[in-house]
């Protein structure tokens, strides 16, 4: 009988000590972030390859288009490498924080993703401005017989349009993650207040 009781106590203690399961929505989000890092890297390498290939052509439009292709291609490749390098670590850090204090971990991640959501809106506005600006440059270059300006405008508008398309998918993924965080925060409830206890030696 004592053996059975001891086994029950140990089982209960093990269940209590066992940390909560990892926050699956976070794992899903960071897996998608890592996959998008591969897409950014591929997109950047393609831009670098295309820009490098047309740079040597004896054509002003091609030389102009090569400038945004090479510049933004390098930026996209660098961003992709960064995402590939940090996404797993971010997921592990979130799992660790969630196991230690689920309420605080979800609250902190929710605040971070709210900033990310606002940042996406800003980035998309900038990309739309680049698309319009690139089209205006191309029109101005064609009207004034400046082929390099025309090519640079075309290259900028195309790069910005492709970047906007990728960012829209990323923003949608972030929005779904934000909704999952908000739902998890409601389930967990507010943080528990800290109670100060005074102790005396007698």
Image: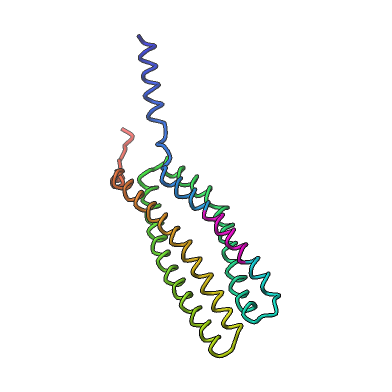
Membership of 80 in magenta stretch: no
Quadrant location of residue 16?
top left
Which quadrant holds the N terminus?
top left
Q: Is residue 35 left or right of residue 122?
A: right
Residue 191 is situated, as x and y percent measured from the top left of the image, at 31, 46
Q: Is residue 63 left or right of residue 177?
A: right
Outermost top residue: 1
Q: How many labels were placed on the picture?
A: 0
Residue 149 is situated, as x and y percent measured from the top left of the image, at 58, 83
Name the residue nearer the viewer: 170 or 57: 57
Name the residue nearer the viewer: 175 or 14: 175
Residues rendered magenta in the picture:
36-47
* Above or below 94: residue 52: below
Residue 125 is situated, as x and y percent measured from the top left of the image, at 42, 71
* Above or below 130: residue 39: above
Q: Is residue 133 left or right of residue 60?
A: left
């Amino acid at each position: 009988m004592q053996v059975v009781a001891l086994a029950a106590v140990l089982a209960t203690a093990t269940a209590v000590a066992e940390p909560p399961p990892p926050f699956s929505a976070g794992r899903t989000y960071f897996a998608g972030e890592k996959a998008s890092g591969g897409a950014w890297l591929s997109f950047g390498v393609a831009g670098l390859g295309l820009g490098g290939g047309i740079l040597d052509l004896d054509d002003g439009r091609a030389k102009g288009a090569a400038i945004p292709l090479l510049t933004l291609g390098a930026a996209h490749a660098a961003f992709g490498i960064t995402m590939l390098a940090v996404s797993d670590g971010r997921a592990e850090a979130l799992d660790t924080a969630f196991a230690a204090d689920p309420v605080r971990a979800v609250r902190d991640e929710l605040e971070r993703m709210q900033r990310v959501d606002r940042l996406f809106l800003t980035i998309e506005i900038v990309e739309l401005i680049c698309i319009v600006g690139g089209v205006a440059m191309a029109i101005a270059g064609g009207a004034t017989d400046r082929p390099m300006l025309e090519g640079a405008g075309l290259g900028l508008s195309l790069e910005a349009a492709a970047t906007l398309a990728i960012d829209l998918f990323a923003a949608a993924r972030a929005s779904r993650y934000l909704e999952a965080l908000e739902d998890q925060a409601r389930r967990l409830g507010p943080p528990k207040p800290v109670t100060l206890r005074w102790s005396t030696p007698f």
